[in-house]
Image: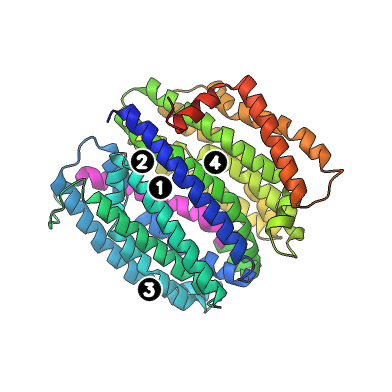
Amino acid sequence: MSIKAKFIDSIRWNALSTIGVAVLEILRLFILLRLLSDFEFGLFALASIVLFYVDALNDIGFSGAIIHKKINAPDKLSSIYWFTVFLNFIFAIIIFFLAYPIASFFEELALVDIIKTISIIFIIGGFGTIYKSVLIKEMRFRGLSVVQFLSTVIYFVVSIVLAYKGHGVYALIYGIIAKALMENVGYVILGRREFDMQFIMKLGGLGYYFRFGMYQIGERATNVIRKELDTVLIGKFLGTETLGIYSVMKNLIVRPYTLINPLITNVTLPLMSKINSSKAELKKIYLNQLNALTTVNAFIYIFLAVFAVQFVRFYYPEGWQAHIFSFSIIAITYLLISIANPVGGLVVSTGRADMGFFWNVGVLTIYAICLFIGVQYDLLTLCISVLICQIILFYPNYSYLVKRLTGATFSEYFKMIFKPSGLMFISIVLPFILTNYLGPDLITLILVGLLSVLVYMGLIYKYQPNSFHQIKVLLGKN
């Protein structure tokens, strides 16, 4: 199969998986909001800090190196695999014994057993993460998509059944463990077809992987600290219940970008790695993916921000109306985050993990200052502080990373973002006016949603017709 054929097939399967996962995740959270308390969601949010470090550390930064390198010898892959398994056992032991200090920091002793339980995910992930990297490099997204969807089904069933039976926060904990087990078993089964595993662990000759991995780990670690610093500070200064409210809103709002962006970026990453010697081709692929992602994300996040009253009243239980404005602010924040996100694939595909590391250190510094100011007051002030931080970082993200790695001008970059965002703002003018004459209920939400979609699609068809060509590519009709 040619690279183009692989690309089209990969996007199609990613699209199917993404839609299925999105529906299940939104439905799961809708049900769990009526079975679990804000405090229990807060406990899970604190425990999730460990989960984010699992994602960041369990491949020791080798995944990016494997994808970037043109050829990976089987003996080197085997050595990397067993070294990764070994280190993940060590990480699990460390997290197990750090459970009490972490719980003491947040003054929530219930976290001790939760963190000890969740530490097993390090061990589970260690066996599958390198296989996953090989599958991504070889663009085996059909199998990856099936594994992702089935693991989400397992998470959906386990978490809801256990929550209904009264297991509280452990419904979420056991659900995420079951999901991790299903995913990694799938990666191992599929990945064994791609290279012959050898029972060797020779670290000599892995210098390239270690050098690349060191920067990757540094970049990811600072990125995780930045992403989860809000959770840490809210849990410490504003309390676990407030954290539960914030995390539920954030987890729903972040869902579209975490599902939609990988639909494209997971496929374009190995593609960009194969043509990383041509800056012109890199620029073309990067700007096209940025425009495609913004076209979708702008609709979702601007819609959620503008019609937050109707959405919050429908989706969340009674008592959440006080947080409608915070919901809107978080939605706009994640539109900006979704725009900045694709640059990570650009960093990996060009082998410039060092630039990604230094960038994240700078971002973390600014983000920490904004967050610390916000938590001194209340949840709304915190949300506004985070939004201001993202606005401040918009141009530096372009000038330090995008411009240097692709050579794109700011006008080229800004056009890919401004055009779909501007069209979406125009699209919601009439629906927003209509809300003044309709009630803040589900019927109103559906009506303004349908009207917004029709107007937006009409404007996209007239002013950005290439987007419909991209939809054909997604469906494999080109």
Front of the two marks 1 and 4: 4
Q: Are marks 1 and 4 in contact (CB under 8 Å)?
A: no
Tell me which segment is drawn in magenta: 207-231
Q: Amino acid at mark 2?
A: Ala
Front of the two marks 4 and 2: 4
| Secondary structure of the residue carrying numbered label 1 | helix
Q: Amino acid at mark 4?
A: Ser
- Specify the label residue 383 is tagged with: none
- Specify the label residue 338 is tagged with: 4
Q: Are marks 1 and 2 in contact (CB under 8 Å)?
A: yes
Q: Amino acid at mark 3?
A: Phe
Location of mark 3 (residue)? 96
Q: Nearer the viewer, residue 428 or 398?
A: 428
**Which percent across, then down, holds residue 42?**
58, 68
User: CA gap, disc 1 to disc 2?
Assistant: 7 Å
**Which percent across, then down, holds residue 160?**
53, 68
- Specify the label residue 353 is tagged with: 2
Residue 218 drawn in magenta: yes
Residue 229 drawn in magenta: yes
User: CA gap, disc 1 to disc 4?
Assistant: 18 Å
User: CA gap, disc 3 to disc 2?
Assistant: 30 Å
Q: Residue furthest right?
A: 437
User: CA gap, disc 4 to disc 3?
Assistant: 33 Å
Location of mark 1 (residue)? 219
Q: How many marks?
A: 4
